[in-house]
Amino acid sequence: MTQPQFTDFYTILPFTILVVWACLLLLADLFIPRGRKGITAFLAAFGLAGTMGYTITQVGLSSIGFNGMVTLDGFSTFANILLIISGLFGIALAYGYTQRMGIERGEYYTLLLFSVSGMMLMAQAADLIIVFLALELLSIPLYVLAAFNRKTQSEEAGVKYFLLGAFATGFVVYGTALVYGATGVTSLSGIFFAASNGTSGLLLSIGAALILVGFGFKVAAVPFHMWTPDVYQGAPTSVTAFMSSGAKIAGFVALMRVFATAFPSISADMTGILWAMSALTMIVGNFVAISQTNIKRLLAYSSIAHAGYILMAFVPYGNKDVVSISIAAGLFYLLTYVLTNFGAWAVVMTLEKAEGKGLEISDYSGLAKKYPALAAAMAVFMLSFIGFPPTLGMVGKFYLFRAVIAGGFNGLAVIGVVTSLISAYYYLRVVVNMYMREGDPTIEQDPGLSFTATCTAVATVALSFVPQWLFLLASTALLR
Amino acid sequence: MNTVPVDYYVLLSAVLFTIGAMGVLIRRNPLIIFMSIELMLNAANLVFVAYASVFKSFSGQIFVFFVIAVAAAEVAVGLALIVQIFKAKKNINIDELNSLKG
C-alpha cells in the first residue's frame, strides 16, 4: 500500500473543498439567527463559487487518484462545472422561495451542498464502490430536501422518493455485486480488461442490466418513472428544480462513464435494451404530458421525455467511431436541458402562491400583457424544450439526432423527431395561454428568480448562435 | 476440506433479492417495504462476500462494509420521514399517501 500523495487529493480537490465547506457551514449555521438565514445562503453560494474557481483551473488536466478510485479528466470537469452551475441556480431559486413559503432553514443550503458534492464525486468515480457512495451521498440529502415543506405535507413526496430511491440503490448494489462476481474487480478499467478477455458474459450482462435499472430510476426513464410526477409535484418547487437538473446530470454522467469505460464488450446485449428504454421514455413522457393541467406535473413529464432524448446518446455506445461524438452530444444536451429547465422552473416559481396556488396552466392566461418580459422568457424555454430555433434546445437535439444517425439507428431518430413534434402541442399550450387568453395573473417579486430566468433565457438564445464552440468544449470532455 | 460451491451462494442471494423486490412491490407498509429493501442490499452483500472468498480479494469485503454503513445512514433518514408521516396522519399505510395522484 502506498500513502496518499498530493496528486491524489488534487484529483478531487473541488469535491474536497465543497465537502469541507459544507461541514463548516453546518457548524456556522448554528450561530446565524433565525430569520437571517440569507447569510447561510450567501455562504453556501460563496463556497460553490470557490469550488467553481478551482474546477476551472483543472480544465484540460487529467490525473488518477487513490489507486484508480477517482479520476480527473475533461469529462468530469465539464460535468462538475455543469453541476456547480445547477447548485448556484438551486440556491438562487431557494432563497426567496423558502422565505415566502415559511420554510426558511439553514440546513436547506447545507444539504444542497452535500448533494452537489455527491454529484461531483459521481462525475469523477472510476470505481463502482465510488459510484455507489456518490449515489448515496447525492440521494440522501435529496430525500430530506424533498420532504422539506412540512406545511404542505411534502413528507409524502419525500417518503415516496426515499422508498423508490432506496429500491433503485438495491438494484445498483446487486448489479455491482454480480459484475464483481463476473470479473473479480470493481474498478471500471479493470472490468473492461476482464470483460474483453472473455469472462463469464451472462453474469456480467445481468449485472450491467441491473445497474442500468437502478440508474433508470434515478434519471426517471420509462418504465422506472412512476415516482417522478408525484415527487416533483409534492416537493417544494425550488427542490424540484434542483432535483430535476442535478440528479439527472449525475445519473447520466455516471451511466455514460460506467457504460463507455467498463461495458463496451457487452454492447451487443445492452444496445437493444437501451434502444427500447429510450424510445419508450420519449413516447410515454410526451404522450402523458399532453393531458396534464398542472404545470409542475407537465414539467415532470417533460423531464421524463428529455431523459429519453438523452438516453438516445447511449444507444451507439459500443461503436468505437461514434461513441465520442455521441457522448459529446449527450453532454451538450445535458447543458441545454439544465439551462432551459432552471429557467422554466424559475418562471413557475414566480407565479406560484402559498398552498400550491398558481400552478395550473390556466393561471398563465394573460401573462404576456401584464408581464411581457416574463412571458417572453417562458416562451423561450418552451421553444427550447420543443427544439425550435433559435434556441439551444434545437442545437442540442440536432447533435443528438446526428450522433444517433451516425451510429446507424435511424428508427430511433425518427421516433425522437416525431415525439418532439408531439411535445410542441403541450409546450405551445402554455405559450398560447400566455399570449392569446385573457387573464389577470399576479407574480411574486423575487430577485433570485428574475436573475435565474434572465440568465438562462439569454444563455438559451445567445449560446445557440455559437454552438460549435460549446460542442468543441463537450468533445474535449472525452473519457480517458 | 469440502467447501460450498459459490453457485449456491449466488442462487441463495438471487432468491433473497427476488423476495426483497417482491416485498417492495407487494407490501403496503413503508416499514415492511424498507425491510424488503434491506433484504435486497443484504442479498448483494452475500454475493460480495462469497466471491471475495473465491477470488481471495478484499475489495468485495470492503464493499460490504460500505453497503452496511450507507444502509445505516439510509435508515436514519427513512425512519425520520416515516415518523413524520405518522405524526401528521396517524397512519403509515402507503395507500393512504394519495394526495399526489400518479
Image (cartoon, coloured by chain):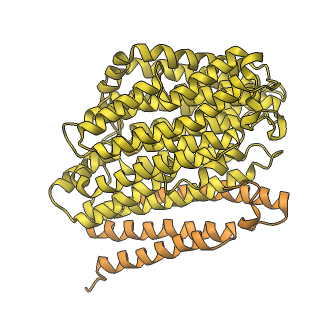
- Residue closest to the eye, A461 or B16: A461
A70 up-or-down from B55: above or below: above
Asked where in the image residue A102 lies, by quadrant, the reply is: top right
Query: Where's residue A80, x and y in %?
Result: 45, 29
Q: Residue at x 80, y 36 (%)?
A: A103
Query: Where's residue A125, x and y in %?
Result: 39, 41
Residue A41 seen by the camera? no
A98 to the left or right of A14 = right
Query: Where's residue A200, x and y in %?
Result: 22, 66
Asked where in the image residue A311 lies, by quadrant, the reply is: top left
A278 up-or-down from A250: above or below: below
- Residue closest to the eye, A198 or A460: A460
Identify by letter the chain in orange.
Answer: B
Tell me how many marks there are: 0
Query: Where's residue A239, x and y in %?
Result: 66, 38
Give the drawing colour for chain A. yellow
- Residue closest to the eye, A462 or B72: A462
